[in-house]
């Protein structure tokens, strides 16, 4: 079986198309990973803020209970 110039050119074109598709797929995966990391960071920031707010509210509530709980003499 003889490989002709036409066969070689078809193979080169097919390889070029495959390489382009592979690059595009890698780019899509990178973008998805970047978006996932951004979402994870956002969730972590929000969680930290929520926990800080809850801690502050507990602290204020504890102070209010202590103030109300003192007997007047």
Image (cartoon, rainbow, N blue to C red):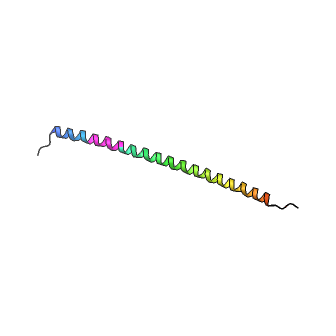
User: Compared with residue 38, is residue 5 higher up or lower down, i.e. above or below?
Assistant: above
Where is residue 30? Give x, y as percent.
42, 45
At x 44%, y 48%, the residue is 33
> Within the magenta stretch, is there residue 21?
yes
Q: Splitting the image into 4 quarters, where does residue 24 fall?
A: top left
User: Quick one: which residue is furthest to the right in this view?
Assistant: 73
Q: Which residues are magenta?
A: 15-24
At x 51%, y 50%, the residue is 40
Count of marks overlaid on the render: 0
Closest to the observer, 67 or 25: 67
Q: Quadrant of the C terminus?
A: bottom right
Where is residue 43? Give x, y as percent.
54, 50
**What secondary structure is the stretch in magenta mostly built from?**
helix
Side of 65 relative to 47 (left or right): right
Side of 65 relative to 19 (left or right): right
User: Compared with residue 48, is residue 12 higher up or lower down, i.e. above or below?
Assistant: above
At x 69%, y 56%, the residue is 58
Closest to the observer, 73 or 56: 73
> Within the magenta stretch, is there residue 20?
yes
Side of 48 relative to 69 (left or right): left
Closest to the observer, 15 or 64: 64
At x 61%, y 50%, the residue is 49
Where is residue 63? Give x, y as percent.
75, 56
Q: Splitting the image into 4 quarters, where does residue 23 fall?
A: top left
Where is residue 34? Give x, y as percent.
46, 46
């Amino acid at each position: 079986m003889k490989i002709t110039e036409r066969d070689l050119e078809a193979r080169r074109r097919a390889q070029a198309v495959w390489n382009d598709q592979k690059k595009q797929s890698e780019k899509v995966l990178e973008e998805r990973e970047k978006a996932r990391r951004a979402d994870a960071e956002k969730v972590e920031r929000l969680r930290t803020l929520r926990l800080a707010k809850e801690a502050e509210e507990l602290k204020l509530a504890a102070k209010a209970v202590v103030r109300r709980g003192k007997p007047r003499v």
